[in-house]
């Protein structure tokens, strides 16, 4: 029972730095009849009480980041003096109507997310007639589909909305025009995220309805397709125009030229990246006097680079990478860019032609000229750049001697006649142009990886005799579609690596001819379409990597039903959608399952305990090709690594950056050999399973950016090999379990869980301060009265140093498998020794 002064006007019950409230909100708050400010954020309240309407003097009400579910009570309409209402960050709110908003004539800011108001047909009318509403945030909400008859009674009265943010929300094509017509006074508008979060997984066109938004300064559109609305060109007050992450496939030169014609042009940030925009850029960009950042990367822009870019005196970042620009880049393109820090011209067909005496006006920190022709000599102007922290000049045609100041280049240029032998390894050189077809006449093993090869010759298919067994063309610049003959004629091929090229188009159906294929790598290309059903013929596949492409569709059920020998399945960073098929649980030999960075939704299948290789010891390799020798990209302990060998020792499940919901299935904790589990960036909820401590070999665990609640299981403290942990950005509460393991992690592993307390966080749990202080006083008094003999400690210290030195150095001579087991044993011995010394000191 709260005992409060009924005359107070300010009550802050937000749990930013102390234990949150939980359970029902006390009705005793009603006695605060004069209350004007009420903050109950970051607690664990399950619902908004109806008696909230009794606080008729309230001006500020904050229920954000609780566990509130259910319908938003209409009693909020009684708060007629309310200025700010924040209901964001809750679990699953619903709204059948927003009629109560009409009574809040002073409401300026309304924040609501993770809400479903698909039944609230009056949402548009209610928001539009709110006279004082200026900021409306409705992120991750579900809007209803409305027909024109729902708006026939709406007048043209304007309101005061200046900020509208519906990031990540789901809505249909009829909703977008209503959002653009919600207010003519918009200054900030964000419609970003629909394409990535809508369960229909299908982008929609955006209407050309920006003519009336004359005051717009910040515009962010993401997840749409079709053409860029031409009316954007009339927004002369724009300061930020962000159109990244769409599927716009039109030109944009007319729109940019319209913006250039605006008087007192104020554009500071122009981001057009990750679209399908084509055609040239305007020739005269010099009128963008205030432009600081220009992103046009990952499009299909062509023609030459406008020289007028060199007159953008405010420009700090220029990124035109991954386009089809051609021609020369000279001093004129960069002559007045004195503030430039970031320069990326990579993956175009540009040639840098600078005078040998040229001194740039800028000091770069980041420079990427990959695939630009800057050779044959090293450009002398690079010597003037004293602040570079990241530089990439790969595939740039340099044939010069590497200077001492330059460290980020590889060469070993070979120009000799290519051999014609059964085993050919010409990897990691600077070969360019087309693949010489004569290499495939008699070679059984051919490795041309890590060169700058760009194409297959027209007669390529005519030279293949079908006897090749091993072909590695990875890490080149191969573009165009994959030749059909590569699959159709190489019937004996067991190993094919085309990773990290620029191949496009669909995966040919002729892949059905690769009956013997065991290792297939197509990662990091521009492949599109779906996984062909003809791949079902590749029944011997052990390794399938199609990550980092533009593949789509659902994950085929036949992968688990037919490709039952798979050890590694990499589908990450594509556009796969739908649920995880339960048939994947039949992959009993699977050791690495990575479907991260897609649009997968639904629950995690509970049958994953059928992954036998993650439950019990199994053979380290299968088939004729060692998986350990195949280069793979893995997110390990929070960082991306390329693993070349010994990956057979790892057991990885990565489902991060999708739209998964529900709880972690208990069956997942049966995978006792699992090394890494990454479920971050989803919408998973519930409690972390109590028996997660069963995953005794877990070394990396990332559950960040979800909706997990409850306490951190004490079983986590038992994971002695855990080297990376991230539980941040959840709704966890209570004290962090005390152990040497969990307290060794940085506080960033636990941040944005506002109910958590205890080390390594600075937030103390209730009673911790007093207990710690009394314990320190007791220890001090004991040491002051009695000293103990330290001679045994000196002997132990010398012995420990010798043991550690011999152990670490000696282990380096062991094979990798023994080394891993040895260090695990050493780790356990270290813990035992620590406990024994601590007990000795206490005695």
Image: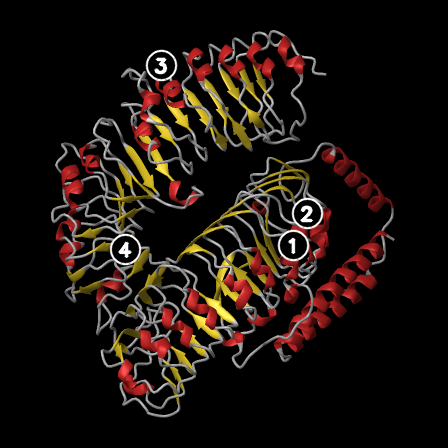
Q: Disc 1 vs disc 2: Cβ atoms closer than 8 Å?
A: yes
**Residue designated by label 4:** 343
Q: Which residue is mark 3?
A: 131
Across and down, in percent, residue 308 comes to 13, 49
Residue at label 1? 668
Q: Position of residue 776 (x, y in %)?
A: 77, 40
Residue 125 spot, x, y in % from top left: 37, 19
Identify the mark nearer the N-term, 1 or 4.
Answer: 4
Classed neighbour count for the residue bearing mark 2: other residues with Cα under 10 Å, few (<14), some (14–19), many (≥20):
some
Tell me the mark number nearer the camera, choosing from 2 and 4.
Answer: 2
**Residues under labels 1 and 2: Cα distance?**
9 Å
Left or right, 78 with reference to 818:
left
- For label 1, the crowd category at 10 Å Cα-Cα, with few meaning under 14, some 14 to 19 and many 20 or more, is many
Label 2: which residue? 689
Task: Decide if residue 62 is on the left or right side of residue 496.
Answer: right
Q: Nearer the viewer, residue 395 or 481?
A: 481
- Residue at (47% x, 79% y) in the render: 516
- Determine contact: label 3, label 1, CB under 8 Å: no
Q: Which sits earlier in the primary sequence, circle 2 or circle 3?
A: 3
């Amino acid at each position: 029972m709260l005992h409060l002064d009924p005359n107070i006007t300010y009550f802050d019950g937000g749990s930013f730095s102390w234990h949150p409230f939980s359970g029902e909100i006390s009705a005793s708050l009603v006695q605060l009849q004069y209350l004007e400010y009420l903050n109950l954020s970051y607690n664990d309240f399950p619902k908004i009480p109806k008696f909230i309407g009794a606080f008729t003097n309230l001006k500020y009400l904050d229920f954000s980041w609780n566990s509130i579910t259910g319908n938003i009570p209409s009693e909020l309409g009684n708060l007629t003096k309310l200025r700010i209402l924040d209901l964001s960050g809750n679990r699953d709110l619903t709204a059948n109507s927003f009629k109560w908003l009409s009574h809040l004539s002073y409401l300026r800011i309304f924040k609501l997310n993770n809400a479903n108001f698909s039944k609230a047909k009056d949402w548009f009318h209610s928001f539009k007639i709110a006279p004082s509403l200026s900021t409306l945030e409705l992120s991750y909400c579900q809007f209803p589909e409305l027909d024109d008859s729902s708006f026939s009674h709406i007048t043209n009265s304007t309101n005061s909305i200046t900020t509208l943010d519906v990031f990540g929300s789901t809505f249909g094509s009829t909703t977008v025009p209503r959002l653009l017509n919600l207010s003519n006074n918009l200054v900030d508008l964000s419609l970003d995220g629909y394409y990535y979060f809508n369960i229909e997984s299908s982008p929609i066109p955006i209407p050309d309805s920006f003519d009336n938004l004359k005051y717009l300064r910040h515009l962010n559109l993401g997840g749409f397709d079709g053409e860029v609305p031409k009316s954007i060109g009339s927004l002369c007050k724009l300061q930020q125009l962000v159109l990244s992450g769409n599927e716009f496939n039109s030109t944009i030169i007319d729109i940019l030229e319209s913006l250039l014609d605006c008087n007192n042009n104020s554009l500071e940030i122009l981001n057009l990246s990750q679209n399908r925009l084509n055609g040239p850029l305007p020739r005269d960009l010099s009128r963008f006097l205030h432009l600081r950042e220009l992103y046009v990367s990952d499009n299909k822009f062509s023609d030459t680079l406008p020289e007028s870019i060199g007159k953008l005196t405010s420009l700090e970042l220029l990124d035109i990478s991954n386009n089809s620009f051609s021609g020369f880049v000279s001093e004129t393109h960069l002559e007045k860019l004195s503030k430039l820090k970031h320069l990326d011209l990579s993956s175009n067909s540009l040639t840098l032609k600078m005078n040998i005496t040229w001194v740039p006006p800028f000091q770069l920190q980041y420079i990427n000229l990959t695939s630009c022709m800057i050779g044959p000599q090293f450009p002398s102007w690079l010597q003037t750049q004293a602040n570079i922290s990241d530089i990439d000049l790969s595939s740039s045609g340099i044939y010069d001697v590497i200077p001492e100041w330059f460290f980020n280049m590889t060469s070993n240029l070979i120009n000799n006649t290519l051999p014609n032998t059964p085993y050919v390894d010409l990897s990691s050189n600077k070969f360019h142009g087309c693949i010489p077809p004569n290499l495939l006449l008699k070679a059984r093993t051919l490795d041309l990886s890590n060169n700058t090869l760009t194409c297959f010759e027209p007669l390529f298919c005519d030279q293949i005799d079908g006897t090749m067994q091993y072909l590695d063309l990875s890490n080149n610049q191969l573009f165009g579609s994959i030749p059909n003959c590569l699959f159709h004629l190489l019937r004996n091929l067991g190993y094919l690596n085309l990773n990290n090229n620029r191949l496009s188009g669909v995966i040919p159906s002729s892949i059905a001819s690769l009956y013997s294929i065991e290792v297939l790598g197509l990662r990091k290309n521009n492949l599109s379409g779906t996984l062909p059903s003809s791949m079902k013929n590749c029944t011997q596949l052990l390794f399938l990597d199609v990550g980092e492409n533009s593949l789509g569709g659902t994950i085929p059920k036949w992968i688990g039903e037919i490709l039952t020998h798979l050890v590694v399945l990499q589908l990450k960073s594509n556009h796969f959608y739908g649920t995880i098929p339960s048939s994947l649980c039949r992959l009993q030999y699977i050791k690495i399952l990575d479907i991260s960075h897609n649009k997968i939704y639904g629950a995690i299948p509970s049958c994953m305990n059928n992954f036998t290789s993650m439950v019990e010891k199994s053979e380290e390799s299968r088939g004729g090709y060692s998986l350990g020798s195949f280069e793979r990209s893995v997110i390990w302990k929070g960082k991306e690594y390329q693993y070349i060998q010994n990956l057979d020792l790892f057991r990885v499940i990565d489902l991060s950056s999708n739209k998964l919901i529900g709880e972690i299935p208990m069956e997942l904790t049966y995978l006792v050999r699992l090394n890494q589990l990454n479920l971050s960036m989803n919408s998973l909820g519930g409690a972390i399973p109590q028996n997660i401590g069963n995953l005794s070999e877990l070394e990396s665990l990332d559950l960040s950016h979800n909706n997990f609640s409850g306490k951190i299981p004490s079983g986590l403290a038992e994971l002695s090999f855990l080297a990376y942990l991230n539980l941040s950005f959840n709704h966890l509460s209570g004290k962090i379990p005390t152990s040497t393991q969990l307290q060794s992690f940085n506080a960033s592993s636990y941040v944005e869980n506002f109910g958590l307390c205890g080390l390594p966080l600075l937030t103390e749990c209730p009673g911790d301060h007093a207990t710690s202080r009394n314990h320190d006083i007791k220890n001090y008094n004991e040491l002051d009265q009695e000293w103990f003999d330290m001679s045994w400690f000196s002997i132990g210290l010398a012995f420990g140093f010798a043991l550690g030195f011999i152990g670490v150095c000696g282990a380096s001579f062991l094979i990798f498998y023994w080394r891993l087991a040895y260090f695990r044993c050493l780790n356990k011995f270290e813990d035992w020794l620590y406990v024994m010394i601590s007990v000795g000191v206490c005695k």
